[in-house]
Image: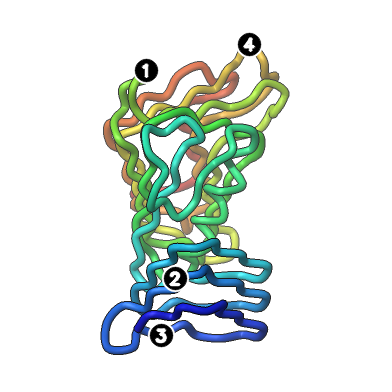
């Protein structure tokens, strides 16, 4: 189905797949909440003033502001507070699970990114742990906070994966902060593979009563 005119969603709606892929040739404006249930190609502008939720088990891509290519990315960071785009991707997978791919490039982090019991089964996968040419998340000076916090105080949080990235704590510019913090006895089965963690004021990886 090709939608050639302006397509406007003003309430809570589901954007379906109609016998294949829906193409929005002149953009899509959403002023309420929308849930995608199939594939949509948008060749114009996408404007969202509500919330757009990905289908169960989705794969999302977050691209750095200096990525080689940003075409096709679900979220494009601005290089200022890239935790906003990353947290948005995390929340889009709430109660679903899925994969968040990071492009190569630097992501500037100015606040903690939090996972709770609704974020089970999320995989974070970067391009490579090469600190120069790969995926690099850097804590901004003056943030003084942890980069990722996995908090199971509200219920079980498990099967979270981190791989192929570098986390930089910038301890010269921060008085506190760890890279990945797991807290709560209901946080378990957390997997960290090929992740280079460096320069955090407190700890690279910190666990408090988690298991697995």
Q: Residues under labels 2 and 1: Cα distance?
A: 38 Å
Is mark 2 in CB contact (under 8 Å) with mark 4?
A: no
Q: Earlier in the sequence, mark 2 or mark 1?
A: 2
Q: Are marks 1 and 4 in contact (CB under 8 Å)?
A: no
Q: Which residue is mark 2?
A: 25
- In three-dimensional space, the C-alpha distance between marks 1 and 4, rounded to whole angstroms, equals 19 Å
Residue 72 horizontal side relative to residue 137, left or right: left
Sequence-wise, the earlier of marks 3 and 1 is: 3
Q: Nearer the viewer, residue 170 or 184?
A: 170
Considering every residue shown, the one lying at the far bottom of the view is: 19
Mark 1, secondary structure of its residue: loop
Say which residue appears at 42% left-offset and 43% top-offset: 70
Q: Residues within 10 Å of mark 3 (few under 14, many from 20)?
A: some
- Residue 16: which disc? 3
- How crowded pointer 2 is (Cα within 10 Å; few <14, some 14-19, many 20+) is rated as some
Image disc number at residue 172: 4
The answer to whether the residues at label 3 and label 1 have Cβ atoms under 8 Å apart is no
* Residue matched to label 1: 132
Quadrant assignment, res 143:
top right
Q: CA distance from mark 3 to mark 1?
A: 41 Å
Q: Position of residue 160 (x, y in %)?
A: 38, 52
């Amino acid at each position: 189905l090709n939608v050639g005119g302006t397509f406007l969603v003003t309430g809570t709606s589901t954007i379906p797949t109609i016998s294949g892929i829906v193409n929005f040739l002149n953009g899509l404006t959403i002023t309420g909440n929308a849930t995608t249930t199939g594939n949509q190609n948008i060749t114009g502008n996408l404007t969202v003033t509500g919330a757009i939720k990905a289908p169960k088990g989705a794969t999302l891509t977050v691209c750095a502001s200096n990525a080689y290519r940003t075409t096709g990315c679900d979220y494009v960071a601005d290089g200022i507070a890239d935790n906003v785009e990353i947290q948005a991707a995390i929340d889009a997978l709430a109660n679903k699970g899925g994969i968040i791919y990071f492009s190569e490039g630097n992501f500037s982090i100015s606040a903690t990114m939090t996972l709770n019991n609704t974020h089970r089964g999320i995989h974070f996968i970067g391009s490579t742990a090469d600190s120069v040419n790969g995926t690099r998340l850097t804590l901004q000076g003056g943030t003084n906070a942890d980069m990722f916090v996995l908090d199971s105080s509200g219920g079980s949080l498990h099967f979270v994966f981190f791989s192929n990235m570098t986390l930089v704590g910038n301890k010269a510019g921060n008085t506190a902060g760890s890279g990945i913090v797991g807290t709560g006895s209901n946080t378990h089965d957390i997997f960290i593979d090929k992740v280079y963690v460096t320069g955090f004021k407190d700890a690279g990886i910190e666990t408090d009563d988690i298991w697995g």
